[in-house]
Image (cartoon, grey):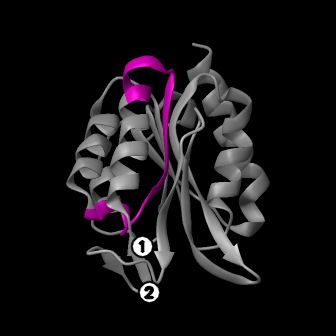
């Protein structure tokens, strides 16, 4: 898979709560004018996670999943609004593919994979010419098995104790991709 700086696709993975989204945001925000796509943030009520909000680098936002949300699409306790994913998230990824230096997606998970449009745009981002940075959960099979076979892709496994090292690697990769 080679050095991170020479790969086109950089995928961050790790257990839930290890800090994938935090690391991604800390690394990406200094380059936000050159990056397109979306990230997710938890919706919390007191100490409980209630859902997920999808946010783009251009200010788009929407509630993507929420406990108790009425929806034909459900995963565990969450109702999922695929319209938010497709009209805000997929649109942001398409825009990034055509007009930004780097495409970023946080996250490629079970909820997101319910959308055929999302799956299609992820395929385009992975195989297209633009550098692609994404997060996936650690055991996101069969997706991880497929991308591990891609010669231009590197997977970084994040752990709490490796956060600073992985952060530096992602930051170096982004710097190189945004300014090359």
Q: Position of residue 72 (x, y in %)?
A: 26, 75
Q: Residue at x 59, y 22 (%)?
A: 34
Q: Label for residue 77?
A: 2
**Which quadrant is home to the N terminus?**
top left
Label 1 or label 2, whichever lies nearer to me, is 2
**Which quadrant is home to the C terminus?**
top right
Residue 111 part of the magenta segment: yes
Q: Position of residue 78 (x, y in %)?
A: 44, 79
- Whether tag 1 and tag 2 are in contact, CB under 8 A, the answer is no
Residue where numbered disc 1 is placed: 139
Which of the two discs, 1 and 2, labels the residue nearer the N terminus? 2
Does 180 sit above or below residue 134?
above
| Left or right side of 2 for 50 | right
Can residue 120 be seen?
Answer: yes
* Magenta region: 95-114
| Left or right side of 173 for 54 | left
Quadrant location of residue 47? bottom right
Quadrant location of residue 51? bottom right
Residue 72 part of the magenta segment: no
Does 158 sit above or below residue 90?
below
Label 1 packing within 10 angstroms: few (<14), some (14-19), many (20+) = few
Q: Residue at x 64, y 41 (%)?
A: 170
Label 2 packing within 10 angstroms: few (<14), some (14-19), many (20+) = few
| In front of the other: 6 or 132 | 132
Q: Residue at x 46, y 84 (%)?
A: 68
| In front of the other: 174 or 67 | 67
């Amino acid at each position: 898979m080679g050095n991170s700086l020479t790969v086109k696709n950089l995928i961050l993975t790790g257990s839930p709560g290890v800090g994938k989204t935090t690391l991604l945001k800390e690394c990406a925000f200094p380059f936000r004018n050159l990056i397109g796509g979306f990230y997710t943030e938890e919706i919390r009520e007191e100490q409980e996670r209630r859902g997920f909000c999808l946010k783009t680098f251009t200010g788009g936002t929407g509630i993507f999943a929420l406990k108790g949300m009425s929806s034909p699409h459900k995963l565990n306790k969450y109702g999922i609004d695929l319209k938010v994913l497709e009209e805000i998230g997929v649109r942001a990824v398409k825009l990034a593919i055509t007009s930004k230096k780097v495409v970023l997606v946080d996250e490629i998970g079970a909820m997101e994979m319910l959308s055929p449009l999302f799956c299609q745009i992820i395929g385009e981002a992975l195989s297209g010419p633009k550098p692609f940075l994404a997060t996936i959960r650690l055991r996101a099979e069969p997706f991880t098995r497929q991308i591990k076979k891609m010669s231009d892709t590197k997977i970084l496994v994040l752990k709490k104790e490796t956060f600073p090292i992985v952060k530096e690697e992602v930051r170096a990769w982004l710097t190189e991709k945004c300014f090359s």
